[in-house]
């Protein structure tokens, strides 16, 4: 995707609840947009209800449009791995099921190579107490979630879910990745 002289790239990640993942990636310098949606399943244009029922095969995911001259895919993968628990199979915290799996839907062989390299580096460094179970899957399709599901954290910052679940994740992210944040 190109706008003027900027050539944007796309990344698609599933790291549990898309509201948490979306809130984090929106704050990165070089990220043009983050869309919550669904990827990795068999139903075309699934609904939130179909995905959360666990029968669609889709994961809650985010699609990130970014400027690789400002933030690299490798930096995005590092943020992805270090802001959720990639050692939990088909779950994140209290969200359980295939729809909450950890996955990188790579768009080309370069993205696959970067994901493999970052994953291996983190495992070699014993960053996680258990083996990483994140799936590396070829990108096939992404379906944006319904409008009410977009920018949930921004629109509902005072909701108890945001305060109890998302706020701590965003705070930890800001501390760890301060160098990559967009200016306020």
Image (cartoon, helix red, strand yellow):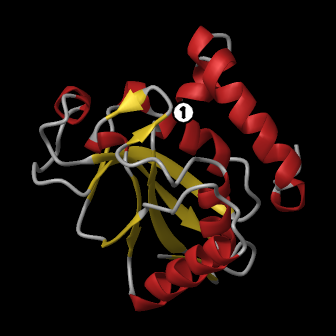
| Above or below for 12 versus 175 | below
Viewer-side residue, 7 vs 89: 89
Q: Is residue 23 above or below residue 27?
A: above
Give me the residue at 16% from left, 32% from top: 50
Q: Is residue 78 above or below residue 173?
A: below
Image coords of residue 163 (percent x, y): 68, 16
Question: Tag 1's secondary structure?
Answer: loop
> Residue drawn at (82%, 61%), measured in percent from left and top?
180
> Image quadrant for the C terminus?
top right
Q: Is residue 169 above or below residue 38?
A: above
The answer to whether residue 10 is left or right of residue 85 is left
Q: Is residue 113 left or right of 53 when viewed as pictured?
A: right
Name the residue: 64% across, 84% down.
Answer: 5
| Residue 146 occupies quadrant | top left
Asked whether residue 73 appears in the rendered view, the answer is no
Q: In terms of depth relative to the viewer, which is nearer, 122 or 68?
A: 122
Left or right of 43? Residue 177 is right
Q: Position of residue 173 (x, y in %)?
A: 76, 46
Q: Residues within 10 Å of mark 1 (few under 14, many from 20)?
A: some
* Residue 44 x %, y %: 12, 50
Q: Give the residue at mark 1.
A: 151
């Amino acid at each position: 995707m190109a706008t003027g002289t900027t050539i944007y790239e796309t990344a698609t990640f599933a790291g549990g609840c898309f509201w948490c993942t979306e809130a984090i990636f929106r704050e990165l310098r070089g990220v043009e947009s983050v869309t919550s949606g669904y990827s990795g399943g068999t139903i075309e244009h699934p609904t939130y209800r179909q995905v959360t029922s666990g029968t669609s095969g889709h994961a809650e995911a985010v699609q990130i449009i970014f400027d690789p001259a400002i933030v690299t895919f490798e930096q995005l993968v590092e943020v992805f791995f270090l802001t959720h628990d990639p050692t939990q199979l088909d779950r994140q915290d209290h969200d359980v099921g295939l729809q909450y799996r950890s996955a990188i839907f790579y768009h080309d062989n370069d993205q696959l190579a970067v994901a493999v390299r970052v994953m291996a580096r983190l495992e070699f460094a014993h960053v996680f107490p258990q083996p990483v179970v994140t799936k590396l899957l070829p990108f096939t399709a992404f379906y944006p979630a319904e409008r009410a599901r977009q920018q949930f954290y921004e629109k509902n910052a005072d909701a108890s879910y945001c305060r109890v679940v998302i706020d701590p994740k965003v705070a930890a992210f800001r501390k760890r990745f301060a160098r990559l944040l967009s200016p306020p």
